[in-house]
Image (cartoon, helix red, strand yellow):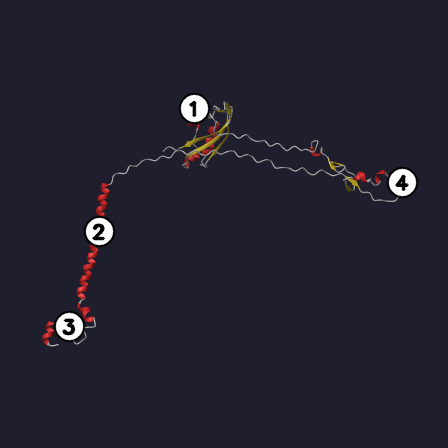
Amino acid sequence: MNATNIIKSDFLDILFDGRNKDYGAYDLRRSEDKRVRNAIIGTASIALVIIGGYVVSNNLMAADMHTRKDVAVVDTYLKDLEMPEEKPLTPPPPPVTTPPPPASSSIKIVTPTIAPDELVKEADELPKLEDVGNKSVGLTNTVGDDVNGVDNPFANGGTPGGVVEAPKVEVKEEIPSFVEIMPSFPGGDEALARFLQKNIRYPHMAQENGIEGRIFVQFVVDKEGKVSEVQTAGAHKGGGLEEEAMRVVKLMPNWKPGRQSGHNVAVRYSLPIGFTLAQ
């Protein structure tokens, strides 16, 4: 390369002077600036597209929120749940007791010996075959609950004919929970509410521990209107709420009894009593 060419040539021409420019390195170096420029332009274009899309999306969402109508909020109230009535369990029948077997009669065994007739006692004589029957052979003569080996039908409190009466099982009458006319507190529901408000004393333990809730008290109103068999049902609250609810129910006067088919009947009644702490 002469002096004239050196002035007109750039660094690559000087670097590859006298070398093979066709194998690729020369072209790559020559086009490097162009490739870098294209890469920067492409990256900037992608970034502009992403940023522009984000801005447009935010604008559309903001416009949509301005056009939305307010949603009405409706209060939802849950109805008071009534506890299911617990049916009384039928008591199982008493266990069957088997009386002991009757004692069998036995006849004394006699060792045969040869002796004159005048020396033989009556008790030492060999028993006749018809006298033995079904009796067992033992050391003494005993009379059991059988006669000649046959069970005595009158033994052990039996009855003639060998028939033994089965023990009587007392069947408790089931008390219904619903009748045609349900029992009512004297004076109606308002009088019942006043009675509870006047007589209920909030237990101190429940107050100190912040225990409140509804206690379901079950009791029986008999044919005369008297309250009996007072008990609680449902989840246990604690703090003395169950005991206080039962105490107040036991203080109640006689109710107006329930009626079924024109007659007074006993009814199992369920009464919810609420305990609420003052705010």
Q: Earlier in the sequence, mark 1 or mark 4?
A: 4
Return the mark for residue 117: 4
Query: Mark 4 falls on what kind of element?
Result: helix
Q: Earlier in the sequence, mark 2 or mark 3?
A: 3
Q: Earlier in the sequence, mark 3 or mark 4?
A: 3
Q: Which residue is mark 2?
A: 53
Crowd tier of the residue under label 2, counting other residues whose Cα lies within 10 Å: few below 14, some 14–19, many 20 or above: few
Q: Which residue is mark 1?
A: 188
Residue 188 in view here? yes
Mark 2–mark 4 Cα distance, whole angstroms, equals: 142 Å
Crowd tier of the residue under label 3, counting other residues whose Cα lies within 10 Å: few below 14, some 14–19, many 20 or above: some
Crowd tier of the residue under label 4, counting other residues whose Cα lies within 10 Å: few below 14, some 14–19, many 20 or above: few
Q: Which amino acid, by three-letter code, is at mark 4? A: Asp
Query: Mark 2 falls on what kind of element?
Result: helix
How many marks the image carries: the answer is 4
Mark 1–mark 2 Cα distance, whole angstroms, equals: 72 Å
**Which residue is found at the position 81% from the left and 40% from the top?**
129
Q: Could you tell whether 18 is left or right of 104 in the image? A: left
**Which residue is found at the position 11% from the left and 74% from the top?**
5
184 above or below 39?
A: above
Between tags 1 and 2, which lies in front? Answer: 2
